[in-house]
Amino acid sequence: MSIEVRVPTILRSYTNNQKAVTAAGDTIADLLTNLDTQFPGFRGRLVTPEGALHRFVNVYINDEDVRFLGALDAKVNDGDTVTILPAVAGGQESPADADGRLSAAASVR
């Protein structure tokens, strides 16, 4: 079974800077275990000590979020593409007037 796994930049240090790697498994959990065999430490960046996906990691099977497919128990098939994306958060709050509306200057930043 061959499954392409697309690796985000932040995790490429584990995959010898490869953007995509091939792995095998029947579920996402199996796939991550296989990846960890090939690239030690990889699984630990995605899975908590309790065995769940970290909240700040998004994993997709053919563009479908695994959180809605069974998380680590989500099934994968030969030829699937698994994409790992770090969650994006943060940013800068926009300054507001005393009444809570954005000022004109703030809205053009």
Image: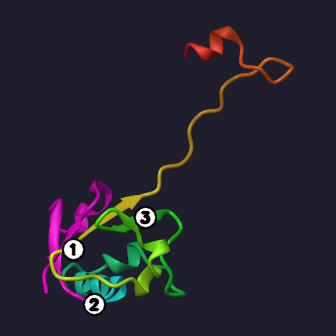
Lower position in the chain sequence, tag 2 or tag 1: 2
Check if mark 2's residue and mark 3's residue have beta carbons within 8 Å.
no
The quadrant where residue 57 appears: bottom left
Check if mark 2's residue and mark 1's residue have beta carbons within 8 Å.
no
Q: Give the label on residue 26, or none.
A: 2
Q: Classify mark 2: helix, strand or loop.
A: loop
Please tell me whether residue 17 is drawn above or below residue 71 in the rendered image: above
Span of residues in magenta:
1-26
Q: Position of residue 97 (x, y in %)?
A: 80, 17
Q: Give the label on residue 58, or none.
A: 3
The quadrant where residue 103 appears: top right
Seen in the image, is 1 located left or right of residue 66? Answer: left
Gap in angstroms between the C-alphas marked 1 and 3: 16 Å
Q: Classify mark 3: helix, strand or loop.
A: strand
Callout 2 amino acid: Asp
Callout 1 amino acid: Asp
Which residue is located at x 53 percent, y 48 percent? Answer: 89
Q: Position of residue 74 (x, y in %)?
A: 39, 83
Mark 1 highlights which residue?
Answer: 80
Check if mark 1's residue and mark 3's residue have beta carbons within 8 Å.
no
